[in-house]
Amino acid sequence: MTEQLLYRLPWQSPAVYPGAHTGQTVGAGPLFKRHGSLLAHPDPRRIDVRASVLNPFGDYQVRLYQQQSNITVWVIADLSASMGYADKPEILRQFVQTAADSAFAYGDKFGFIGCGDHFEQRWFVAASQQPATVTGLCQQLAQHRFSGSAKHLAQAVQYLPSQRAMVFLLTDCHYPLPQLRNLLATLQGHDVIPLVLWHPDDYTRLPQWGLLALQDLESQHSRLLLMRPSLRPKLQMAYWQRHLALKNSFRAMGSEPLFMTGPYSTPTINHFLQQRAA
Amino acid sequence: MNLVVTTPWVLAGLLLALLPVFSRGMTTSPTPYLPLLPPDPLSAVLAVLLRLCAMTAIAGLVLGMAGLYSSEQRVERIGLGAHIVLLLDRSSSMDNSFAGRAPNGKEESKADAARRLLTAFVQQRQNGLMGVAEYSTSPLYVMPLTENKQAVQAAIAATATPALGFTHVSKGLSMALSFFQGQTVTGSRIIVLVSDGAAVIDHDSEQKLREWFKQQQVHLYWVFLRTANSPGLFDKPEDSRDDNPQVMPERYLHQFFSSLGSPYQAYQAESPNALKQAIADIDHLENTPLHYWERIPKQDLSGLCYRWASIMLAVLLAVKFCERKPC
């Protein structure tokens, strides 16, 4: 555990348990939140004399402080066949490990939902603070052979708590845009941080000339392309347009995506998270 | 066109031609999301063509193995031509030259000249049937009406064997006429009589020939190869006592033919060139519309199938070399 995700919240955690993030709960903390009646908060150590004198109603005022609360960090991962391509599984595994370690270091809980064609118990880790569970999950992920589609993503919300949580959505978005919009709509109650995994080889390493038979990893359909210098930019343009369409879809639902096209790098994600909080 | 195969059970292999529908037969490269790629009509057309290539290649191989052939068939045709029976005189005088001598190295015999020119004549005729009959002491049935030119030419060439005794023209004509029996009347029907002499036709035969010529609607051409100093067709005897069939059979035969009522033309050829002229005349005159059935023999198509399959396989092999992977 060398690097950690440094996530800060642009919102207040509703949790009552103490943690490392700004929360809505009044309690022990360094930040002044508001004044309250001594009757409601019977702690005479916190009586604010000046506020009590100025209070037109004449009762004693105590200073109330904002309690630092914890949050739950969820990782919703797309486990479809396209996610098993190239180094995506490795990125996924590394991210899950790093996110879990960071959550535990912050004192937050960590949960994981893996979505393939169906719900599978082994790809569900309830929110907890048990590093051993995550280690086991990562081992399973390393051995898993990805197959099928990401249909179950839309049902992932069923396993999330009703309280607002931080949700990392790891997917390559290789499914129709309406499906993505539906998924984002179900996740509106949470703080969604989309991490889109794309492999740059898909569009940078196309040949100039020749016949290229491409097979879809999920549907198994194949297509023949007669590669020629005029087609190559068209294909790259298609990827770029998809990139824009995805970005717009995410933004329309209030979340900015991070496209991870290179090898896994925690600083890149941290940079993105800090921009987001600012 | 009727297509037939020699070993039908091999045709079950045609099911293999469906294989390219299920498999492209190319090394595929994985791609995460295919619908993302823009449609490319050129590639789509090429993909369909390659599938067709593969399917027809397999089908070609299977049909070749099954031994595909087109069965014999008759094709209805309409052309210009005539049905011609060549009636050749095989009397021994035909082996003499036009000068009436046994041929030496320089001049050819009448039979040789007739053979050479008739062979060329047969070669020239585009359409129509031909038959060959001969006569000497009795008629010789050589070749019925056929469209096979080679057979007719061979029949004409067969007259090169030494000739026989007498000249019995009426029986020869009867046989030539009998060739037309049972044939549908289409185009013109011609008998080309090539002879160098004539004979008396008795009364009964005369009656019969008159009847048959009318029935069969046959045109008659007589190419008379006149030997030097022999009586011609149109000569009138100086002495009226000589004016009888026994002395001048040619003159009387000519008169008989003229009186038949059916179209008749006589050519008196006194040299090979005149004979050539006569035959050219007949060739020119007898071209009337003709309705006939042409026979097309059985044709083996398996070679064609294999050729097609090998071309397709060559195309597919070339395509195989063009395959690329994302580099």
Image (spheres, coloured by chain):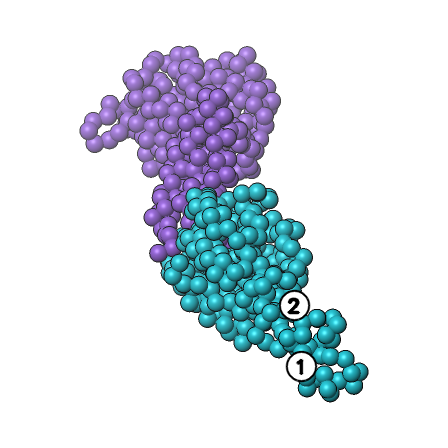
Q: Which chain is purple?
A: B
| Residue furthest out toward the right | A57
Mark 2 falls within which chain? A
B232 vs A173, left or right, is left
Q: Position of residue A86 (x, y in %)?
A: 41, 52
The answer, for residue A256, to whether it is visible in the render is no
Q: Counting other residues with Cα less than 10 Å from the Cα at mark 1, is it few (<14), some (14-19), or many (20 or more)?
A: some
Q: Residue at x 57, y 42 (%)?
A: A121
Q: Which chain is cyan?
A: A
Residue B67's disc is: none
B317 vs A170, left or right, is left
Q: Residue at x 40, y 37 (%)?
A: B309
Q: Position of residue A168 (x, y in %)?
A: 54, 60
Q: Residue at x 41, y 60 (%)?
A: A264
Q: CA distance from mark 1 to mark 2?
A: 20 Å
Looking at the picture, tell me which residue is in the foreground, B133 or A231.
Answer: A231
Identified by mark 2, the residue type is: Thr
Residue behind mark 1: A48
Task: Report how many numbered discs are placed on residues in the image.
Answer: 2
Residue A242 occupies quadrant: bottom right
Do labels 1 and 2 touch, CB within 8 Å? no
